[in-house]
């Protein structure tokens, strides 16, 4: 679609979301000094929406979260309370000081623009409102995401005081989601999170006007977007944000009254628990997902069963791992749904063997894991660069278990090079875990040679 046409559609669409009114006030200080220049007081509806719709917290609760995050990242010179949050949201303080903006970004995982605390935008003519912030190098993806979404035919006059949503918008977001999953393989999470989050926020806005079956389908696609965002935050190593988005996914799945999505959402939460090293929680969450499993489609059962296997691997329960993965393998040929989420099992013919190899590596079953990793890595397409790095790190772990030092260093070096290229925190965690296994050989010349390369990742890896 030509850009000019997309922009016209954009102006049509944003009429759904009127801009907040601007209140002109004169500060007491200005009156006292004789300086009567008016200041603009524009409520920060974006920050308020993040607190209320995403975090679902009061101002006091959000202030406590913000203070805790400041302490965690070493910003000791701030003090946050509910009144300060109110000043930001009500527009009494137009823009928080830099130290507060840094903590807000660190806590929410959103950019300053998404939080409404970015640089002040130029004035926009009243008859041409805009949802889109000034487009800079960082925000261009958000501009494209919103403009493309606005090119869909959205509304005609309706009965809720607004405009009913054209059901075609659901198909648009589903198609976009499939592209996001493909882009994740090529771009990695850092580049993708802003686009996915902005599109999710647009879906939430559309929900305000949606009714009936269209509303339910929008809830379903919203849950698919939050499920993807959960995974993306896992990959950047922010388990706090991942847990928050996993909770959103579960809530949306229940609101949509979709048993398949509820199973998917519980499995997402189990994935976060697994990354946190909590095998028991992983097993419990997947058991809940599999309750009344006859009502579940094959894909959800495969998802939950393979994730349960990872939980049992963390607990060292080999027999349960094999039972679950063998059962999931038998279901693979029956995966035939058209849900836009949870399709990792369709992207590799070795999907179950990848899970088995990972479980065996976690249980330090070196010889069996090595055989499986050789099979998986031989068949891996070159486009799966990040996954290939993760698999190399896990193969290196299995090789270290067998004392095959030279091969361990070769595999680990390949994984480190991929980590430098992709910035995947998940891959860095795998490398750190494998590197710790090399402590018995820390004075070996080949290990010392690899030490600097590993240390450059900026993690505890590279030091014994």
Image (cartoon, rainbow, N blue to C red):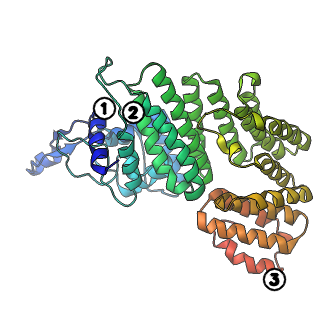
Residue at numbered disc 2: 205
Pointer 1 or 3: first along the chain: 1
Pointer 2 or 3: first along the chain: 2
Question: Horizontal placement of 84 versus 394: left or right?
Answer: left
Badge 1 marks a residue whose secondary structure is: helix
Q: Residue furthest front?
A: 1
Q: Is residue 373 above or below residue 248?
A: below
Q: Crowding at label 2, few (<14), some or many (≥20) Cα neighbours within 10 Å? A: few
Residue at point 32% right, 55% down? 135
Question: Horizontal placement of 236 versus 323: left or right?
Answer: left
Instruction: Say if mark 2 contacts mark 1, CB within 8 Å.
Output: yes
Q: Which mark is residue 445?
A: 3
The Cα–Cα distance between marks 2 and 3, rounded to whole angstroms, is 59 Å
The Cα–Cα distance between marks 1 and 3, rounded to whole angstroms, is 65 Å
Q: Quadrant of residue 434?
A: bottom right
Q: Camera-side residue: 20 or 96? A: 20
Q: Quadrant of residue 389?
A: bottom right
Q: Is residue 393 above or below residue 171?
A: below
- State the image coordinates of residue 396 (x, y, percent, origin top left): 80, 65
Residue at numbered disc 1: 16
Residue at point 41% right, 24% down? 210
Instruction: Say if mark 1 contacts mark 3, CB within 8 Å.
Output: no
Residue at point 81% right, 75% down? 442
Badge 2 marks a residue whose secondary structure is: helix
- State the image coordinates of residue 24 (x, y, percent, origin top left): 16, 40
Q: Quarter of the image for the C terminus: give it.
A: bottom right
Residue at point 74% right, 77% down? 450
Badge 3 marks a residue whose secondary structure is: helix
């Amino acid at each position: 679609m030509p850009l000019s046409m997309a922009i016209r559609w954009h102006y049509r669409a944003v009429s759904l979301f009127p801009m907040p009114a601007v209140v002109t006030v004169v500060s007491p200080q200005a009156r006292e000094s004789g300086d009567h220049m008016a200041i603009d007081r524009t409520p920060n509806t974006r920050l308020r929406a993040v607190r209320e719709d995403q975090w679902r917290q009061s101002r006091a609760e959000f202030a406590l979260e913000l203070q805790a995050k400041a302490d965690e990242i070493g910003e000791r010179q701030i003090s946050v309370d509910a009144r300060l949050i109110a000043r930001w949201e009500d527009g009494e303080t137009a823009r928080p000081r830099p130290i507060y903006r840094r903590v807000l970004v660190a806590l929410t995982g959103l950019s300053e623009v998404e939080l409404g605390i970015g640089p002040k935008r130029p004035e926009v003519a009243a008859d041409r409102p805009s949802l889109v912030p000034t487009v800079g190098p960082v925000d261009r993806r958000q501009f494209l995401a919103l403009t493309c979404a606005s090119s869909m035919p959205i509304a005609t006059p309706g009965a809720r005081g607004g405009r009913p949503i054209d059901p075609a918008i659901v198909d648009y977001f589903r198609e976009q989601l499939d592209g996001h999953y493909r882009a994740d393989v090529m771009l990695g999470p850092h580049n993708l999170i802003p686009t996915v989050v902005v599109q999710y926020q647009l879906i939430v806005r559309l929900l305000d006007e949606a009714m009936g079956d269209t509303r339910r389908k929008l809830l379903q696609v919203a849950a698919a977007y939050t499920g993807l965002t959960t995974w993306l935050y896992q990959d950047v190593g922010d388990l706090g944000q991942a847990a928050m988005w996993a909770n959103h996914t579960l809530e949306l799945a229940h609101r949509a009254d979709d048993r398949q999505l509820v199973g998917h959402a519980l499995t997402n939460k189990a994935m976060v628990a697994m990354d946190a090293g909590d095998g028991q929680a992983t097993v419990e969450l997947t058991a809940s997902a599999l309750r009344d499993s006859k009502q579940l489609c094959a894909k959800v059962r495969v998802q939950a069963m393979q994730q349960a296997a990872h939980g049992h691997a963390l607990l060292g329960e080999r027999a349960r791992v094999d039972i679950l993965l063998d059962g999931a393998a038998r279901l693979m040929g029956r995966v035939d749904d058209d849900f836009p989420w949870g399709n990792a099992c369709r992207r590799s013919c070795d999907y179950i063997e990848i899970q088995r190899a990972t479980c065996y590596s976690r249980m330090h079953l070196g010889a069996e894991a090595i055989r499986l990793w050789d099979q998986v890595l031989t068949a891996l397409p070159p486009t799966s660069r990040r996954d290939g790095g993760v698999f190399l790190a896990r193969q290196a772990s299995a090789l270290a278990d067998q004392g095959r030092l030279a091969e361990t260093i070769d595999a680990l070096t390949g994984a480190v090079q991929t980590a430098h290229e992709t910035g995947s925190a998940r891959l860095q965690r795998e490398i750190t875990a494998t590197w710790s296994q090399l402590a018995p050989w820390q004075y070996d010349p080949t290990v010392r040679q690899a030490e600097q390369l590993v240390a450059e990742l900026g993690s505890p890896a590279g030091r014994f």
